[in-house]
Amino acid sequence: MISTAKLSYLRISPRKVRLVADLIRGEKVEKAQTVLNFTRKKAALPLLKLLRQAVANAKNKYLKIDEKNLYISKILVNEGTKNKRTFPRARGRADIIQKKSSHITIVLDEIEKKPEKKRLKAAARKRKKKLKEKAAEIEKKEGEERLRTEEPKAFKEKIKRRQEIKRARTKTGKGLRRFFRRKAF
């Protein structure tokens, strides 16, 4: 948490403010500012001012911070006080109108760059995985060559066994599903 900014008693209902707040949650500051500039909602302008205030707070707190490295880590829209007003209705009754307000909190944080060591470890894992795959392919090819070099009868028998195993798998597996499938009426 690098900086926070709070706005209290904004005379817009929290439900309406949350629609705009959801647009910028988790975004970089620059992108959030452009989104708020072009959003046609009443809550966009107060949120934009609050975001600019949070950026200014971050610059004052940390002098060498760059605005491009900041993102909105948390944005909270809570319910504020309700001003209750009466509204005349038929037969002398009165209804209550609630004029709602909201409290907004924005928390900015800095984007952390991942260290280079982790990238190197991931690259090494990928290389090992590729080497294992290549070794498996080579072993498979060698196994097929051995089968071909054996006597033709033994080779044909092994192929037949493999085909029988495949047929048995399809009969016990997906093949039987169509018989037990429910019919639509």
Image: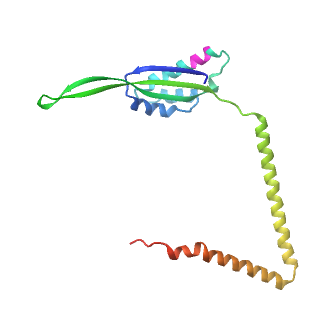
- Residue 77 position, x and y percent, is 45, 28
Colouring mode (rainbow / by chain / secondary structure / one colour): rainbow
Residue 136 to residue 72: above or below? below
Q: Position of residue 111 (x, y in %)?
A: 65, 29
Taking 144 as reference, is 63 left or right? left
Please, which residue is most extreme toward the bottom here? 153
Task: From the top left corner, tell me how far across and down residue 118 is, in percent.
Answer: 76, 38
Please name whichever residue, 153 or 86, is drawn nearer the observer in this view of the structure: 86
Identify the residue at horizontal 85%, vertical 77% (top origin): 148
Drawn side of residue 11 relative to residue 115, left or right: left
**Residue 176 forms part of the magenta stretch:** no
Left or right of 34: which side holds 9?
left
Q: Quarter-wise, where is residue 151 in the image?
A: bottom right
Q: Residue at x 51, y 28 (%)?
A: 75
56 drawn magenta: yes
Q: Is residue 52 above or below residue 159?
A: above
Q: Residue at x 49, y 28 (%)?
A: 76
Depth order, front residue of 146/80:
80
Tally of marks: 0
Give the extent of the magenta segment.
55-60
Our reading of the magenta stretch's main secondary structure is: helix
The residue lying furthest to the left in this view is 91
| Quarter of the figure that contains the C terminus | bottom left
- Of residues 181 and 146, the one drawn nearer to the viewer in this rendering: 181
Q: Is residue 179 left or right of residue 101?
A: right
Say which quadrant the N terminus sits in.
top right
Percent x, y of residue 10:
40, 21
Q: Residue at x 38, y 25 (%)?
A: 12
